[in-house]
Image (tube, rainbow, N blue to C red):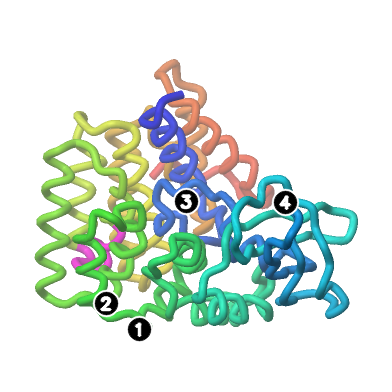
Amino acid sequence: MNSKGLRSLLCLTIALFVIGGSLPACPLCLGFALKEPTLADEVIAAQDVVLAEAGSEDRVLEVKSVIKGRASLSGLRIMLPEAKGDAMFLLTRLDEASGWKLQGRSTVSFATFLPQLTGLSGKPSADADWVARMTAMRPFIGHPDPRIARSAWMMWAEAPYRIVKAEAHQFQRNGLRQWLADPAMAGQRSLWLVLLGLMGNEEDTAWLSAQTEAAWKAGSDPQLAALLTAFTARRGGEAVDYIGQHYLRDRDRTLEEIQAALSALGLHGREGPAEMRQDVLAAYRVFMAERKPLAGLVARDRAAWKQWEFAPAFQAMLASPEPIHPNARAAINDYLRDLPKTLSPLPSP
């Protein structure tokens, strides 16, 4: 599969989960980043983390410093054929039964970076755990060492949106605009867009509006869901109306674009004020009426918000000979399966 095809598949997968509210994280912040373990992930998961230096024997390393694990590891000699050159290397090991994994050459930056990881949990279970991770990693955003920079960015990008929203104050909007303009950080744009939507000013609002219009005219944007999320955070109900007119009702939009639009709307419907949810619901109602083959794409949000009055409409869609997109059909079936058995049939809205 080529990169475009992979990106399309990932977009659809992310959108399906986000529309249904099934992910605890903020995949809109992740954009198209494939979740491969970062250096931070490896260090946090490891039982043993050491710095080892090449010795007199070829490809044999000697532990010089124990970052994590038993102090008795100091002085241990480790045979690693892939370790080449006269340097200090970072090694991790899940447990004593596992082999050592080479994490690359150590840099002076590791002296401040690695200690920040030793007290962090592998799978945050509480908001405080997320905040601890994000605060610890904030100073390393944009670090010159790409291993460190990616670790820091990922801990922010995969956090729940509500926590990203609460912790956005750790950034400066001018810094976000600089990163958005930096081609070297193009792969991280999704997070910067979401953050700019949360903390931008009138100038940023105008810029996001122009970017949204340009994305609609171009017909493709790899960070469309994040862009529309930021646009809606700044423009509120006006943005919902724009998305409804330009994406949900526009017959020239691709399925990827529609799902990106629904992802952004669904996120604000879940996380925004009550009046925002009402705006989103109004857009969903029009979408269901005008785009019946895709109407089921909003079913999981309807279920999450306990709007069971749409059951007759969804049942009629399944019984109709009109085609239904497979993703939409699956979402409708989930909605009807979750329908409380105590509810009696209600007339279609």
**Disc 4 residue type?**
Asp
In this figure, which residue is indicated by the disc labeled 4?
58
Residue 326, labelled with which disc? none
Q: Residues within 10 Å of mark 4 (few under 14, many from 20)?
A: some
Q: Residues within 10 Å of mark 1 (few under 14, many from 20)?
A: few
Task: Look at 72% across and 76% down and name the residue there.
Answer: 65
Q: Quadrant of residue 230?
A: bottom left
Sequence-first disc among 2 and 1: 1
Q: Which residues are magenta?
A: 229-237
**Do tag 2 and tag 1 residues touch (Cβ < 8 Å)?**
yes
In this figure, which residue is indicated by the disc labeled 2?
199
Q: Is residue 234 left or right of residue 165?
A: left
Q: Residues within 10 Å of mark 3 (few under 14, many from 20)?
A: many
Residue 169, labelled with which disc? 1
Task: Look at 39% across and 33% down and name the residue there.
Answer: 8
In percent of width and height, residue 246 lies at 17, 43
Give the structural element (helix, strand or loop) at label 1.
Answer: helix
Sequence-first disc among 2 and 3: 3
Task: Look at 56% across and 80% down and name the residue there.
Answer: 111
In this figure, which residue is indicated by the disc labeled 3?
18
**Do tag 2 and tag 3 residues touch (Cβ < 8 Å)?**
no
Cα–Cα span, label 2 and label 4: 53 Å
Q: Is residue 336 magenta?
A: no
Q: Quadrant of residue 52?
A: bottom right
**Disc 1 residue type?**
His
**Disc 3 residue type?**
Val
Sequence-first disc among 4 and 1: 4
Q: Nearer the viewer, mark 4 or mark 1?
A: 4
- Locate the C terminus by quadrant: top left
